Image (cartoon, helix red, strand yellow):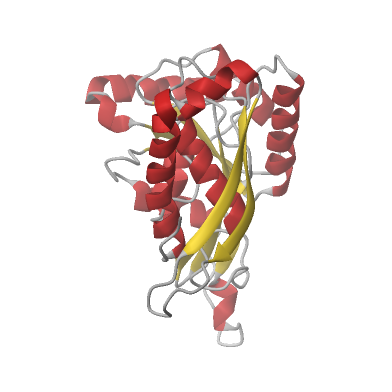
Amino acid sequence: MSVRTQSSEEPAEARHRAGFACFVGRPNAGKSTLTNALVGQKVAITANQPQTTRHTVRGIVHRPDAQLILVDTPGLHKPRTLLGERLNDVVRTTWAEVDVIGFCLPANEKIGPGDRFIAKELAGIKKSPKVAIVTKTDLVDSKTLAEQLIAIDQLGKELGMEWAQIVPVSATANKQVDLLADLLIPLLPEGPALYPEGDLTDEPEQVMIAELIREAALEGVRDELPHSIAVVVEEMLPREDRPADKPLLDIHAFVYIERPSQKGIIIGPKGKRLKEVGIKSRKQIEALLGTPVF
């Protein structure tokens, strides 16, 4: 590794780094939770089932010396449907465009065929450095964690792939999350910030709001409802005749389902379930926008 010292002629901003990282892994490997922990605000949805992230949500980590832009992709998996194939295409396209790839493997699950499938694909990408991230370390003891770290190191060797780093983290317990950022940043190219400070994501607000509603709609019904559900925000309008110090934003959204039989599950008896979706998502949306919504 070469060490460079900064000469007096070299501009100070040359030290600043900015670039893109993406987290890949099996569905539910903890990618979205990790994005949220790094950014410090909920930007990617974390519903408790696979394939809930339909959009590429970028979270932005601002530091004085760097800007790390996180691209959250759907989990790569063996596709069984056309939608699955399209989601995989989105993942691969993202991989080709980022500066560093974080491969998320849960500490509490042994490396399986799904992980090997992804690792094999990663081994074919020569340009981007790859960091193995062992997630959910709060769920295991130190012996299990050590065994997982050895298994991941071995997996890289089997495929002729060198990990830039292997980092254990717990996003929920906020353990080693900052360290992960410290290790990802040196892998980014030098350059000025790509987004204004204060930006957390470049997703349009309506897309993020739709994702929050979708997350609330999926909560608690994963056994009955597959994840073929979509939400579209039709319009967002400030409520008329409201005093300036008490604004209210009206949000109109459509929830699309695959089959008519799923309508009852979403609505619930006497509309109770749909009301809960509204209450749960409203809290998240108000935190995002900083204004009361209906």
Q: Where's residue 274, x and y in %?
A: 45, 34
Q: Is residue 137 above or below residue 14?
A: above
Q: Where's residue 104, x and y in %?
A: 48, 32
Q: Where's residue 23, x and y in %?
A: 55, 40
Q: Quadrant of residue 141?
A: top left
Q: Is residue 82 above or below residue 240?
A: above
Q: Residue sitting at 70 percent across and 31 percent down?
A: 87
Q: Is residue 151 above or below residue 23?
A: above
The number of numbered badges drawn on the structure is: 0
Q: Where's residue 156, x and y in %?
A: 55, 25
Q: Is residue 70 above or below residue 190?
A: above
Residue 63 vs residue 26, the one in the foreground: 26
Q: Quadrant of residue 81?
A: top right
Q: Is residue 289 visible?
A: yes
Q: Residue sitting at 45 percent across and 54 percent down?
A: 285
Residue 61 vs residue 255, the one in the foreground: 255
Q: Residue furthest left?
A: 141
Q: Residue furthest bottom?
A: 9
Q: Residue sitting at 52 percent across and 19 percent down?
A: 225
Q: Residue sitting at 49 percent across and 20 percent down?
A: 154
Q: Is residue 132 visible?
A: no
Residue 292 vs residue 205, the one in the foreground: 292
